[in-house]
Image (cartoon, rainbow, N blue to C red):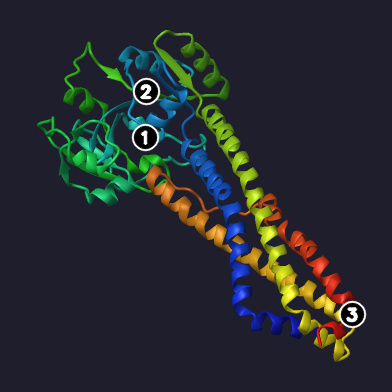
């Protein structure tokens, strides 16, 4: 009986019910979107860098070194002497030492001069190679190229295709289109295409580092590298090499995990500020609920009086108003959670496309759900005063 009356009342004032549900859903979604997107960004960024143990780059900002050499988001600032790479390559503690050279691009996708050891990088020593070929083979000769999955897809280059690189670490195809003329005479030939990794190097075009030196006129005595990826035989080797490199005047050793932890702290500070704002939004939503319930209580005095005159007990009048509020707020919160997750998923996808690496779908944690469903008891509390008032009022005043 009570449920039938509640549903009927909500249907009779359908427009008012819709506005209440919309207000609650929007407030709930706003409280969830940014934390969910930041969580996806955190997980995606951590996954994208986990294959790189130690990055060695020129002295400067560790964050900039990671963003340029690992995430391919910024141009590098300076190069290292080739002797630095040679010294690391001869180190008995090294399992793999991979040189990196940046400076050229093709239609906005960065060319990375490197060695074939890049195809041996693994998440753990027992895992299969991180960069696996989908088609073709690794490069063997100077002007051969292996394309990341996204670079191949968006440039349309196939195995056997040839292209000329552009000078400069361009961030977009539009910038590349307005670049200077091609600065090399011999074309690169595509010999392989990599499987998708979901990481930023899906945008990369891997070429032999000898081609980079030749294109830029770097002879035996002038050779440089932009960065070096170092993998130690043991974890202790990585930390020992990092300490030794950081004592040198020309290079710095960067542990990507430490840099990411610092970035995470900055993100958490921003998330805390947004959390305070979202609580304010939820509080305003609670006020909206209270105002709507109070206004509905005033409008329905005659309806409540009619129920009482027909013999409805006080408890029925009280429970009808309370259940209406619970149902409205509960449905509004559920719609808001679905809307917030959907917006966060779309936002994560768009942000991942812009950054160049995959962001996993957002996950609804218990603390975020608790924050959203905090509106439910607030709505019920807001319904108590008009419910008690409707229960106490005499039907004779309104009939």
In the displayed structure image, the side of residue 154 where residue 63 appears, left or right: right
From the viewer's perspective, tell me whether residue 298 is left or right of residue 247.
right
Q: Is residue 356 visible?
A: no
* Pair 1/2: label in front: 1
Q: In this view, does 13 lie above or below 165?
A: below
Q: Mark 3 points at which residue?
A: 314
Q: Looking at the image, tell me whether mark 1 or mark 3 is earlier in sequence order.
A: 1
Apparent side of residue 397 relative to residue 283 in the rendered image (left or right)? right
Give the mark toward the camera: 3 or 2: 3
The percent position of residue 368, horizontal first and vertical second, equals: 66, 51
* Residue with the most extreme bottom position: 310
Marks 1/3: CA–CA distance:
69 Å
Q: Quadrant of the C terminus?
A: bottom right
Residue 27 lies, in percent from the top left, at: 61, 57
Residue in the image at 55% along x and 48% along y = 34
Q: Quadrant of residue 42?
A: top right
Which mark, by number, is residue 72? Answer: 1
Earlier-in-chain disc, 1 versus 2: 1
The earlier-in-sequence mark between 3 and 2 is 2
Determine the image quadrant of residue 141: top left
CA gap, disc 3 and disc 2 = 78 Å
- As helix, strand or loop, the secondary structure at mark 3 comes to helix
Say which of 381 and 306 sits in front: 306
Residue placed most toward the observer, 352 or 148: 352
Q: Residue under circle 2?
A: 227
């Amino acid at each position: 009986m009570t449920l039938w009356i509640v549903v009927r009342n909500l249907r009779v004032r359908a427009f008012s019910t819709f506005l209440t549900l919309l207000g609650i859903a929007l407030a709930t979604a706003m409280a969830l979107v940014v934390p969910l997107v930041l969580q996806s960004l955190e997980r995606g960024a951590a996954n994208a860098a986990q294959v790189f143990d130690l990055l060695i780059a020129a002295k400067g900002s560790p964050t900039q070194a990671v963003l340029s050499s690992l995430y391919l988001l910024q141009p590098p600032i300076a190069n290292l002497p080739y002797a630095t790479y040679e010294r690391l390559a001869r180190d008995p503690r090294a399992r793999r030492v991979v040189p990196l050279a940046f400076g050229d691009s093709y239609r906005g996708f960065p060319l990375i001069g490197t060695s074939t050891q890049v195809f041996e990088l693994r998440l753990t020593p027992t895992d299969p190679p991180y960069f696996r070929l989908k088609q073709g083979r690794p490069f063997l000769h100077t002007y051969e190229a292996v394309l990341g999955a996204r670079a191949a897809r968006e440039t349309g280059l196939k195995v056997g295709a040839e292209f000329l690189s552009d000078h400069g670490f361009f961030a977009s195809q539009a910038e590349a289109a307005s670049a200077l003329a091609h600065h090399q005479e011999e074309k690169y030939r595509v010999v392989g295409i990599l499987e998708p990794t979901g990481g930023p190097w899906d945008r990369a075009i891997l070429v032999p580092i000898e081609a980079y030196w030749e294109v830029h006129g770097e002879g035996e005595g002038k050779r440089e590298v932009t960065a070096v990826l170092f993998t130690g035989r043991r974890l202790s080797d990585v930390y020992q090499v990092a300490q030794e490199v950081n004592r040198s005047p020309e290079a710095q050793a960067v542990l990507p995990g430490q840099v990411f932890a610092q970035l995470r702290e900055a993100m958490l500070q921003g998330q805390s500020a947004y959390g305070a704002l979202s609580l304010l939004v939820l509080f305003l939503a609670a006020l909206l609920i209270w105002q709507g319930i109070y206004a509905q209580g005033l409008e329905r005095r005659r309806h409540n009086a009619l129920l009482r005159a027909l013999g409805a007990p006080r408890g029925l009048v009280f429970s009808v108003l309370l259940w209406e509020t619970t149902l409205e707020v509960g449905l509004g919160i559920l719609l808001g959670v679905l809307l917030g997750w959907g917006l966060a998923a779309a936002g994560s996808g768009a942000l991942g496309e812009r950054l160049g690496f995959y962001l996993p779908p957002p996950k609804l944690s218990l603390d975020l759900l608790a924050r959203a469903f905090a509106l439910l008891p607030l709505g019920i509390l807001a319904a108590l005063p008009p419910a008690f008032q409707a229960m106490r009022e005499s039907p004779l005043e309104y009939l």
